[in-house]
Image (cartoon, rainbow, N blue to C red):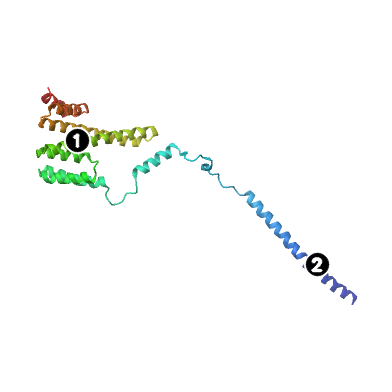
Amino acid sequence: MELAWENIRIIILYIKLRLALRPVLRYLFLLLFLGQCAVVVAQSPSAPANPAANTPAGVDTRSKEEKIAAMKAANKGPATTNVMSASEEALRVYQKGLDFENARQYDSAVVVYSQAIQTDPNLVDAMLKRAGVRFLQVEFNLSLRDYDYAVEQAKKQMENFSYKASIKKVLGDFEGQKVDQAKSEYLKEKLAEAYFGRGHLKQFMEDKAGGCDDLRLARDMGNQRAKSDLLDLCK
């Protein structure tokens, strides 16, 4: 009997001991868990440093290749859609003007060329064609105004594309340089054509000196017809 009571007392003490130690064990387990978390965080790779964080404000840290790519993207503009751009629409209208001119419907040709110029004021081809048609219609003052405008626009655009080509060469964008240089050369031909047409117009308007000056400019820019005409008109 005494042995039974002794066992019961031991069991009661065991239960009291477990109840007393339960908060302590929980605390120990919590410390162990937090320690493991700290180890995992310490061993994980740190986030890469932001190189721009130590870069002074306003300093462009892009490479030359990145700058060229950005320039190309800017020149391309927004993504293309099925809607025609102003220059494409102007060229479409300009082609109609050529059809009217070839059919000798000069009044209609002038109207359509004017529409093309209004759509794209930089379309030197349409300016030259309208000037030529007005010359055929003996509207010399209007024709002279068109030639003056064509000379001004062709010269300005030619110089602009030439400058852009030189910049792209410095940046190493040789493909872009070739494109802009070709545009500059084309506009140089158009400028020579404008001088040639205006030179003949001035001859008809009895401005022989001014006409010969324009023909010389056309010749110096490579216009072959101006060479022979100078011999006949500007002796």
The residue labelled by disc 1 is 148
User: Closer to the camera: disc 1 or disc 2?
Assistant: 1
Q: Residue 172 in the image: state x and y as whole percent.
A: 39, 34
Q: Amino acid at mark 2?
A: Leu
- Helix, strand or loop at label 2? It is helix
Q: Of residues 57 and 14, which is closer to you in this image?
A: 57
In this rendering, position of residue 227 left or right of residue 54: left
In this rendering, position of residue 73 left or right of residue 130: right
Q: Residue 100 in the image: state x and y as whole percent.
A: 13, 45
Numbered circles on residues, count? 2
Asked if residue 158 shows in the view, the reply is yes
Asked if residue 99 shows in the view, the reply is no
Q: Of residues 213 and 230, which is closer to you in this image?
A: 213
Q: Amino acid at mark 1?
A: Asp
Mark carried by residue 17: 2
- Helix, strand or loop at label 1? It is helix
Q: Earlier in the sequence, mark 1 or mark 2?
A: 2
Classify residue 123 by image quadrant: top left
Mark pair 1, 2: CA separation: 110 Å
Give the residue drawn at x 24%, y 32%.
188
Give the residue drawn at x 36%, y 43%.
74
- Residue that protrudes farthest toward the right in the picture: 2
Task: Report the quarter where the N terminus lies.
Answer: bottom right
Q: Is residue 25 above or below residue 72?
A: below
- Residue that protrudes farthest toward the top in the picture: 235
Task: Report the quarter where the C terminus lies.
Answer: top left
Q: Residues within 10 Å of mark 1 (few under 14, many from 20)?
A: some
Q: Is residue 199 above or below residue 62?
A: above
Q: Of residues 142 and 30, which is closer to you in this image?
A: 142
Q: Of residues 153 and 205, which is closer to you in this image?
A: 205
Q: Residues within 10 Å of mark 2 (few under 14, many from 20)?
A: few
Q: Residue 104 in the image: state x and y as whole percent.
A: 9, 43
